[in-house]
Image (cartoon, coloured by chain):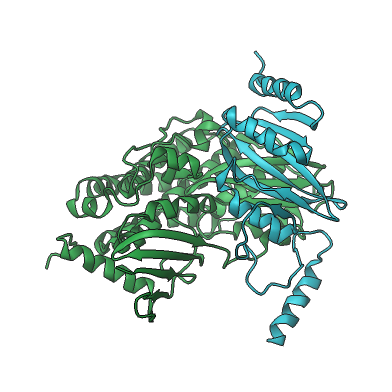
Amino acid sequence: MAKITIPLGPQHPALKEPENFMLVLDGEQICDATVNLGYNHRGIEKAAENRNYIQDIYLLERICGICSHSHVSCYIGCVEEIAKVEVPQRAKAIRTLVAELERIHSHLLWLGVAAYEMGFETMFMYTWRDREQVLDCLEMLSGNRVHYGINTLGGVRRDINAQQAKEIIKKINYLEERTKYYVNLATEEPTVLARTQNVGKLPYKVALERNALGPTARASGVKMDVRKQEPYFIYDKLDFEMITYDSEDVFGRVVVRVLELVESYKIIKQVLSALPEGAISVKVPWKIPAGESVFRYEAPRGEDIHYVKSNGSEIPERVKVRAPTLSNFQSIPYMLKGDYLADVPITIAAIDPCMSCTDRAVVYDAKNGKTRTFDWEELRKYSIEFYKKKGVNFSTK
Amino acid sequence: MSETLKEEELKKELENKFAGSIYEIQIARKNRMWISVNPQDALRLMSFLKEKGYFHLSTITGFDEGENLGAIYHITDYYTIVNVRVRTPKTSPSLKTVRDIYPVCESFERELEDLFGIKIEGLPEGRNYPLPEGFPKGVHPLRKEVKLDELVKQLDSQKEGK
């Protein structure tokens, strides 16, 4: 049978940043895949060199709509290290609290997206409904649902009171109950298992070679979590587990994320039960002394790493950002090889890519030289129908 | 026991093995090392680091110091980050690819080519990354001589020309 090449992307409605995959098919099976990135370059690093340190906080918060706190914390970590700022314990605790709320928000969102790609729309509705609880907490704490603006140089901008803490605990208790249900669904529901087990395989060795990070790596048994390896904020004082799983497939990535939700609830309860008293920020001068620093941060998708160089003025000399998804992309071609075309949506979604949206994919038929346009939605429907024929069906009909 | 014992041991070993190639080496704190090395010995140094267990190239940061361009390779064993700095003159900026040591380097090195105009020897020809197709040739936006408002004007006039 003639091999067919399918370009997928650069536009992608299911995801947040455009990119492009060239899939080479042999019948239904993928025999090669390449990733092309760079459709969404906004020149943020150049822009950061033209703004002062405070303005950069708000600029870098807008790198991502989900990991906004991650990028800012990472950048601030660099600047505070250069300026030798001692951040008050209470500020560190509040940063930790927001970081874990963000992780819950991100993982619940992902669980919904993954369920949707599988055709399990009920679960998608459930998780996104529950995600509102976390967004309410973040709104209550910061005034915003997504770009919290909680961080500032030397601390945080808003304190938390006892009433707010009580409200957060109430919502976390509710989510804990709900998550028990998701753990059961994700690990026991036969249709979920049929769609995720042995799909998108990424062996341990390959995960290390290809720089897999975060839950993607941990689902291949890689013990890597910056919160444990180089604790920042107050993570060294908290009791939580690093979740790993050794199934090396999409199923493992579901399990790791669902169990990480449980760990995040644990962390939040510990932070709130022992919130240190004291100031929430210290004053940091506008001008930062010359120096350079690298900071690592465990974002929901994996290790985020920033480099900042200062030159003694109020404007940084250089800001470098490496988001986890760029690293995780290296594993995608390997995961796709040998899988079916129908597994593409869930496999790509399983690294939780922070990238945007496929409007269309052009299918090129090598045999008759015809092209036809496919969009992500069609590919998703195709994948659901493909599995229905094999008896994997989420609808009761 | 010193907190930075591991880093000091590595420093000693590197100073012995690469005397003459390394012109700056310092331990900033626990888990952070900074090394500046001659470009001709950079690959040998990185191979050595990989053998020592520093197997993960987190990213490569390009920089512009005026006379020199350069790159910092952030290499880690998940705990300690070794930052290897390599400089190259702006008049003919060129570095060798590290893909034989760290095969994941491709997108990072394309960034150096696009944003700083550093020629990477041994990197196969490919599409632009991360700059879009049709971006003005010879403009490397992260170089210090590229001013933001001039760049915006240039890009706008290009758009109008279409």
Determine the image quadrant of residue A338.
bottom left
Viewer-proximal residue among B147 and A299: B147
- In the rendered image, is residue B70 in sight? yes
Q: Which residue shows up at 48% across the image and 36% down it?
A: A224
Classify A8 as above or below A369.
above
| Residue lying at the far right of the rendered structure | B67
Residue A157 visible, this orientation: no
Observer-nearest residue: A389 or B99?
Answer: B99
Q: Residue furthest left?
A: A397
Q: In the orientation shown, which residue stands out farthest toward the top? A: B1
Q: Pinpoint residue A125: horizontal percent, then vertical percent.
A: 30, 63
Quarter of the rendering occupied by the C terminus of chain B: bottom right
Image location of residue B156, percent across then percent down: 73, 80
Report the residue at 58% width, 36% height from top: A232
Q: Is residue A304 left or right of residue A271?
A: right
Rendered location of residue A300, percent (x, y): 47, 48
Q: Quadrant of residue A3?
A: bottom left
The mark tally for this picture is: 0
Q: Which chain is cyan?
A: B
Q: Position of residue A101 (x, y in %)?
A: 46, 48
Q: Residue furthest bottom?
A: B161
- Give whichever of A46, A68 is nearer the camera: A46
User: In the visual, does A113 lie left or right of A322?
Assistant: left
Q: Colour of chain A?
A: green
**Which of the image's four quarters has the N terminus of chain B?**
top right
B114 is higher (above) or lower (below) than B23: below
